[in-house]
């Protein structure tokens, strides 16, 4: 019998990944917005030490289904780099100093927000 309880743990993680996959496919066909500087964001990913290439695709760490239990700042998030870079709502899991990125009071310390901008701590619109 199904419940109305929210998904937790692995189920929640997989459902979030499925949602990101679906939005990436919609973005490919032009149905969703693409970040205006996604190429620069993807270039940062291509130089990152967390980057892993599997079957010709760059990932932020090992692909999600290869490593379910992870610390995003150490292992990466497991997303395909170009799909993640195109999503305006996504942020890099680490800072330019390879520490966990933070989102505080509308500002972001991730590699993309800090490394691609002359301004410190860009405002994050949600």
Image (cartoon, rainbow, N blue to C red):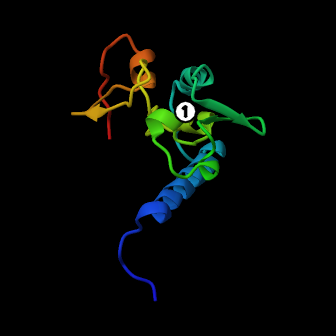
Residue 60 in percent (x, y) is at: 58, 35
Quick check: 3 left or right of 74? left
Q: For mark 1, what is the residue?
A: 85
Residue 75 in percent (x, y) is at: 52, 37
Is 9 above or below relative to 46? below
| Residue positioned 38% across, 31% down in the render | 100
29 or 17: nearer the eye?
A: 17
Give the quarter of the figure containing the C terminus.
Answer: top left
1 or 36: nearer the eye?
A: 1
| Residue positioned 32% across, 32% down in the render | 102
Is 39 above or below relative to 26? above
Residue 25 in percent (x, y) is at: 64, 49
| Residue positioned 59% across, 54% down in the render | 22
Give the residue at the far bottom of this rendering. 1
Please give the count of numbered marks on the rendered protein.
Answer: 1
Question: Which of the 4 quarters of the picture holds residue 94?
Answer: top left
Neighbor class of circle 1 (other Cα within 10 Å; few <14, some 14-19, many 20+) is many
126 or 74: nearer the eye?
A: 74
Residue 39 in percent (x, y) is at: 59, 23
- SS at mark 1 in the image: helix
Is 42 above or below relative to 84? above
Give the residue at the far right of this rendering. 55
Give the residue at the far top of this rendering. 118
Is 126 above or below relative to 122? below
Give the residue at the far left of this rendering. 105
Quick check: 122 left or right of 22? left
């Amino acid at each position: 019998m199904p419940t109305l309880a929210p998904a937790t743990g692995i189920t929640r993680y997989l459902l979030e990944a499925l949602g990101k996959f679906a939005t990436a496919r919609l973005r490919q066909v032009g149905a969703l917005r693409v970040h205006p500087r996604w190429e620069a964001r993807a270039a940062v990913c291509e130089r990152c030490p967390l980057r892993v290439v599997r079957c010709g695709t760059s990932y932020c760490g090992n692909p999600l289904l290869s490593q379910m239990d992870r610390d995003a700042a150490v292992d990466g998030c497991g997303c395909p780099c170009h799909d993640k870079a195109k999503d305006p709502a996504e942020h890099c899991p680490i800072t330019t100093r390879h520490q966990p990125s933070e989102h505080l009071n509308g500002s972001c310390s991730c590699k993309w927000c800090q490394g691609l901008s002359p301004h410190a701590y860009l405002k994050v619109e949600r």
